[in-house]
Image: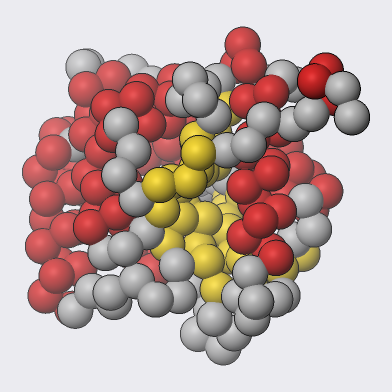
Amino acid sequence: MTTAHMRPEPIVTGEPDLDAVVATLTASFAQDPIIEWAIPTDTPERSRYLDSFFAIVTEDILDRGGMVATSSDYDAVVVWTTPTDAVPTVDESAVLLDRLESATGPTGHRVRVLMELLDEHHPTDLPPHCHVMFAAVRAHSRGTGARAAVTGALRELRLADGVGVYAEASSERSLRLWERLGLSRVGSEIVLPDGGPKLFPLFAAP
């Protein structure tokens, strides 16, 4: 196999460059319909609140034992929990929600509602699985090695013995991508309040 046809291997770590991860998530999700609902585009200082949201959630996942896969330049990232992660207590979950609400300013209530809905709708009858919280590729890197690194990481997750993969697609476009990667719809759609957009839960069996 020639170098031109080799796919770059993702870097999988529990200690990524958090600032680099957050920068890619903020850039990639700025126009995502779910994030636009939670932190509307006309919000003053919106980029600061986006950074805070992605930093706090990613840091919490890593602190509990989660992982990040990235391309070498962090132009593509995947953030997920694992079946062996420490499960937060009710009090710990409340502290996280309070912290998110405080850190996202005037959009804090919407952010809290989003996170509560994700938790409420997470299926309880699935076998052990990784939960992919975020998967993002910067616009200028789509279709390049960065995207290959992300899809490679997702395929590796599916190969883990006895471990499934769960995710929520935040748009019709991302739904089609997840389905191409082998995940199927599971459960009901998660509809955000006030005529908001939908999330589409998906799962791939072990």
Where the C terminus falls, by quadrant? bottom right
Q: Is residue 197 above or below residue 83?
A: above
The front one of 51 and 44 is 51
72, 119: nearer the viewer: 72
Quadrant that contains the N terminus? top right
Considering only vertical position in the picture, is 18 above or below 154?
above
Residue farthest right in this picture: 1
Could one spot residue 194 in this view of the protein? no
| Residue at the spot 57% in from the left edge and 38% down from the top edge | 10
Q: Locate residue 202 relative to residue 87 in the image: left or right.
A: right
Give the x, y percent position of residue 120.
41, 73
Q: Is residue 14 left or right of residue 200?
A: left
In this rendering, position of residue 15 left or right of residue 169: left
Query: Coloured how?
Result: secondary structure
Residue pictured at 48% horizontal, 20% vertical? 73
Position in image of residue 19 (x %, y %) = 27, 27
Q: How many marks?
A: 0
Quadrant assignment, res 166: bottom right
- Identify the residue at horizontal 33%, vertical 18% (top origin): 42
Q: Is residue 205 visible?
A: yes
Residue 192 located left or right of residue 97: right
Residue ID at (42%, 62%): 81
Q: Nearer the viewer, residue 56 or 110?
A: 56
Q: Quadrant of residue 204?
A: bottom right
Residue 68 location (% of width, % of height): 43, 46
